[in-house]
Amino acid sequence: MGTSIIFFSAKTQYQNLGDMIINREILLQLRNYGKLIVDDKGVPEWFCNDLEIDFYERSSNYNMTFEILIIWYALKALFKKECKIYFVLKPGHFYGEFSFIHLLKLLYFVIIKFFGVRICRFGASIGPFSKSMELIESFKSKLMYFYSVRDGISKDYAHQIGIEKVFIFPDMAWIMKATNESFVKPTKGDKYVVFSFRKSTHNLGAILEYKNYLFETLDKIIELVCKKWSYKLVLSYQVEDDKNICQELMQKYKDIYNVSFMEKKINLQTAYTLYSGAEMVFSNRLHVLMLAILSGSLPIGVVDIKEHNKITGIFADEELSNLIINIYSKQSIIDSLSDIVNKKYLFRKQLDTCLERQRNKASELFLSVFGDNDI
């Protein structure tokens, strides 16, 4: 394999544990395939530490901007045929309206593509976009060396907006591995379940309606789980913005059920510890559910199946839709949950198989992208 220089930007949502996880994981994987240069300008030092970015990997060590640095290395690589330059886009969910910055980014893609830079995207969901953004995304994809999404719904949407060559690459959380140092089982005590929720979907115009349906669904879940099955409820949050709704749920249930609230936003260590001891983890955040899978717990999505399509898409791809509760469904929640609990060992076996399959798929695709032959 020839020499590769891989560029990556660490700029993302810094208060979201899920974003830290998927960015840290992709950096861990990319180090296997070349020299890594990470855009750390304006990124909080604590976040760089969480991502485990080494000093020599930081673009701030160079006397030029990250964007110019990519072009500089691409120019030098023109005289070294064995050297390949990659610009890897951050993973996550991309959607929204047009802004002028998107045209500038598109122009930059055209420039670095001209100089031979291989632009790649791994482990992303896309849509919905505005019509103008659909055109930009479609054109942008034609400039990319490797264009992938992390679920079937995103792939179908990509085809709808004119993107023909689309791979499915697993969400980065699938390929994480909990080490013995970080994965600590909690001490024995009360059987408990975890609630961890965001207050809305991306449709901000329907926050009140969504919240009402969510709370009605949670009322039914907690009555079964905490009243009938006598489980303790633990409320926690992985994203700072979720703290208020979790506090609201605490106030709603504390005088009725055995409930506790984790005041501080949990980190990766706390998440492994908390989720590994839980009978079930209920959430409408993808990476709460993904960490529950990695921790050996049973993840149950409580979602708007249309608006939370990155969850429903990933779960549907792995034939895990039975672990999804649609807040707008008329189906009996008692029947759905009872069926999940009765089959929990089968689900757990299925989840372990999914983890192995996705890790193997990711390894194969990484090798094809960063190998000596074109994909």
Image (cartoon, rainbow, N blue to C red):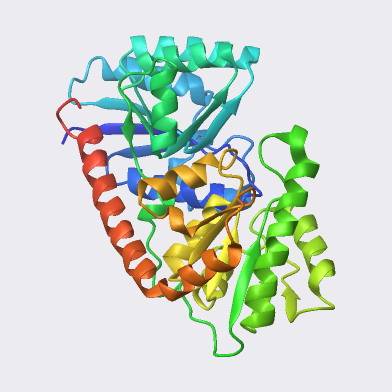
With 350 as the anchor, is 135 left or right in this view?
right
Q: Nearer the viewer, residue 135 or 318?
A: 318
**Residue 99 image position (x, y, % from top left):** 65, 15
Q: Is residue 156 left or right of residue 208?
A: left
Locate residue 326, reporting x and y percent: 58, 51
The vertical placement of 356 against 30, above or below, is below
Q: Quadrant of the C terminus?
A: top left
Query: In terms of depth relative to the viewer, which is nearer, 8 or 95?
Result: 95
Q: Residue 266's quadrant in the figure? A: bottom right
- Residue 136 position within the rendered picture, expressed as x and y whole percent measured from the top left: 50, 13
Where 162 falls versus 220 (above or below)? Answer: above
* Whether residue 53 can be seen here: no
In the image, residue 271 above or below residue 374: below
Count every numbered label the image shows and give the total.
Answer: 0
* 183, 156: nearer the viewer: 156
**163 to the left or right of 66:** left
Residue shown at 52%/64% (left/top)? 336
Rendered residue at 57%/28% (across/down):
95
Quadrant of the drawing holding the N terminus: top left
Residue at 32% from the left image edge and 69% from the top image edge = 349
Q: Nearer the viewer, residue 373 or 300?
A: 300
The relative height of residue 110 versus residue 166 in the rendered view (above or below) is above
Q: Position of residue 81 (x, y in %)?
A: 18, 20
Q: Which picture quadrant has residue 333?
A: bottom right
Tell me what residue is drawn at x 23 percent, y 26 percent. Answer: 83
Q: Is residue 183 visible?
A: yes
